[in-house]
Amino acid sequence: METAAGRRIEKAHPLSEAMDDTHQLREQLSRAWQTTLDAAIAQGMPTLAVIETMSAVAHARFADSFGPAAAANYLQLLAEQLRDIEQNETGNLISGEQPQDFVSEGDMEMALDPNWLVGDKSFE
């Protein structure tokens, strides 16, 4: 399933380019996605619609780039990771330990400017 948006992104940012895939880059990208999510919700968009749309766009892009089978395998991997997190949290609660947060306060302080979504004309 190839989308027009996926083709536009691929032309602008070909996957064949070498990617600087570091932990720092992944953290920065995660903060960017979180900032986008928070900004859209702050503008009054329904939370569930924002999350579902961001997930659908990311999944469609993944499938366009790597194929439907790889996209399905990746979703399975994510589901397994979430199951493991849930099991760990349950174990922590049973043993009386506090559940761990996914995002630290330091990460939130380093987040990107949430107003970039409002200032970007491509969202109008």
Image (cartoon, helix red, strand yellow):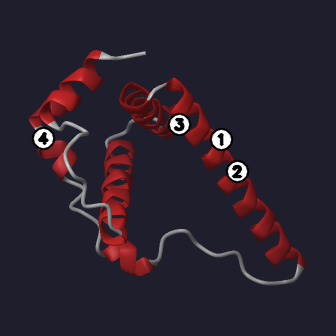
- Position of residue 108 relative to residue 63, above or below, is below
- Position of residue 118 relative to residue 7, above or below, is below
The first of marks 1 and 3 along the sequence is 3
Q: Which mark is residue 80?
A: 2
Q: Is residue 18 left or right of residue 32?
A: left
Q: Which mark is residue 120?
A: 4
Q: Residue at x 13, y 33 (%)?
A: 12
Can residue 70 be seen?
yes
Q: Is residue 15 or residue 121 the one in the foreground?
A: 15
Crowding at dot 2, Cα within 10 Å, few <14 / some 14-19 / many 20+, comes out as few
SS class, disc 2: helix
Which residue is label 1 attached to? 76
SS class, disc 1: helix
The span from disc 4 to disc 2 (Cα, nearest Å) is: 36 Å
Q: Is residue 84 or residue 107 the one in the foreground?
A: 84
Estimate the x, y position of residue 46 in percent, counting from the top left.
Answer: 46, 35
- The amino acid pointed to by label 4 is Asp
The first of marks 3 and 4 along the sequence is 3
- The amino acid pointed to by label 2 is Glu
Q: Which mark is residue 48?
A: 3
SS class, disc 3: helix
Circles 2 and 3: CB atoms closer than 8 Å: no
Q: Residue at x 36, y 62 (%)?
A: 26
SS class, disc 4: loop
Residue 75 lies in what quarter of the image? top right
- The amino acid pointed to by label 3 is Leu
Circles 1 and 2: CB atoms closer than 8 Å: yes
Q: Residue at x 43, y 78 (%)?
A: 105
The span from disc 1 to disc 4 (Cα, nearest Å) is: 34 Å
Q: Residue at x 63, y 47 (%)?
A: 77
